[in-house]
Image: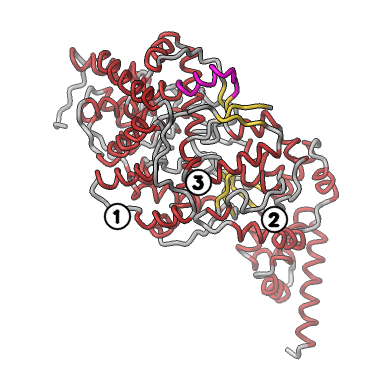
Amino acid sequence: MGVATKILPPQGKDRALLARIEKEAGTSINLCYQCGKCSAGCPVGFAMDYTPRQVIRLLQLNLIDEALNAESIWICASCDTCSARCPRGVDIASLMDALRREALSQGKIKDKKVAEFNKAFLNGVRNFGRTFEAGLLLQHNLKTMQPFKDAGLGLPMMSRGKIRLLPVKIKGREQVKKIFARAEKMRGEEE
Amino acid sequence: MKLAYYPGCSSEGSAIEYDLSTKKTALLLETELEELEDWNCCGATSAHNTNKLLSLALPARNLAIAEQNGMDLILAPCAACYNRLHSTELIARKDEAVRERIKEVIDMDFSAHTSTVSVLEWLDSKVGVDKIKARVKNPLQGMKAACYYGCLLVRPVEHTGFDDPEDPQSMDRIVRALGAETVEWPFKVECCGAALATSRPDIGAKMVHSIISNARDAGAECLVTACPLCMLNLDMRQAGAEKAAGEKLNMPVYYVTELVALAGGASPDEVGIGKHFVEAKGYLGSLPARAAAMAAAAPKKAPKAAKAENEDEAAVGNEDAEALRKKIDAMIKAFNKGPDKMAARLIEDGERAAILADIITGDEKKIARLAELMITDKDKAGKAAEAFVTGELKRREKAGL
């Protein structure tokens, strides 16, 4: 961000992008009057680079790239506290969600760990129809280069019968694969 | 009552005791659960973080299967599954265009007319607290529980709506019906960190620690949850949170269904209490002794309060009793904080007041007695205080001090 900031309504491409994000989120950023209630109650605000209020401000100032590159959108836990409390009815959690999806599709991923977790999670569902917890943790750890993370929990999980070594595969997994393919294709067509 | 049962992926692994205890609870309360045929994962947060249409289509396949089998009411014990399934129902019901797109993606008929309920809604609204109370064989007296609702059972407000989003009460009602005491505490709808505990443990550990320490500071001795991910974070990751914060917590965590099943007569092993990470059987075993100690230490209730306690319907009386109890609790705190100050309020004579301060320090029984009298009858409190001092002086005399 430079010293001087242009405060103009978004034009052309930016305007279309903002409109798409707002439509995806089903909310309007112009409703926000920057009271900060969202950020005061945010349970992960302490770890964010921009608070939720600031993320909205970035969008209001047409600094969309800054918002998409914020670590905050990956730290947001989707707990929905902000949306429940916003006096202006801005669905901030949904906006964070839309920003994550936009950042993903533009390849701007500030926090790879969260994105890799989501990818590993969905890979399991795509292949088996259900989450495969052991496979998920293993894949996540390998992809994020931390092979021994949570290794100490593996054995206790096993001794408690809380981890399956093989995935449960549903009968309709071909159907689920098709659901993934169609949802991805239809999303691509929208943009 | 018959419900379609959507166990959710964690029921086959990390939340195996939630599945066991939900089934036990259903049996106890005469709810027939029929597992949804060939159900798939709801997509959880990962799906709505990635692709909105996918996040609606994955739950919709399950809902469509329920529709095919003529099942209208679905029980999803996992808070995340409940949230995804129920949100999809509402979004698809409201927006025909979205529903049509979902139908295209799942390639099935889908009318979105089903209704998915959480465990809390099932127990509190469908079964009812009275019926639960009637089935209690082993009351959980002596238990001091903090009911933890987390996020997805109460938010988004427009999708859940069966309980207050800031101060929900349904779980508290259920747990109290089992004979336990529930504490009031500010973090009951705070977020446990969800998947952050796995993807960003640096952040997750702090969130887990703040919830557990908040419950402890409010006087709770255990936590109760109705969400497998909350359980995973609060129980399995409690050791990590302790390490990060440099403080031992040792707070057992229970699923609300475990407690219902236990109070209904199940043994701890039957519902999988032994599978927890933070040792949780010991606390259950200690409940009878705790209940006895509490009864002995508790000041005799004022007649009005005692009477009201027997009649749940006497709401006004109950409120009075509750208010009275709070006042007494506050007074006990004041005694613990400043025994000399309180002693000076009871006895004018400085020397005798000092003796009183000395003997009540650390003596919960005496403090409880004086605190109760301070609230109900100040004169009597003064007399009791004088009696304590006189007794102490006699004791000292005998001992030749």
Residue of label 1: A148
Residues B399 and A150: in front is A150
SS state under label 1: loop
Question: Which picture quadrant has residue A177?
Answer: top left
Can the viewer see residue B33? yes
> Residues in magenta?
B61-73
Disc 3 versus disc 1: distance between alpha carbons? 23 Å
Please indicate whether residue B55 sits to the left or right of residue B326 in the image.
Answer: left
Q: What amino acid is found at the position of numbered circle 2 in the picture?
A: Gly
**Residue for point 73% across, 89% down:** B401
**Residue for point 24% across, 43% down:** A143
Residue of label 2: B142
Residues B315 and B91: in front is B91
Nearest-to-viewer mark from 1 and 2: 1
**Residue for point 43% across, 46% down:** A164
Please state the chain letter of the residue tagged with numbered disc 1 in the rendered image: A
Residue of label 3: B231
Please indicate whether residue B117 sits to the left or right of residue A63 in the image.
Answer: right
Disc 3 versus disc 2: distance between alpha carbons? 22 Å
Residues A184 and A111: in front is A184
Instruction: Identify the mark nearer the N-term, 3 or 2.
Output: 2
Q: Position of residue B68 (x, y in %)?
A: 54, 17
Q: Position of residue A30 (x, y in %)?
A: 34, 18
Please state the chain letter of the residue tagged with numbered disc 2 in the rendered image: B
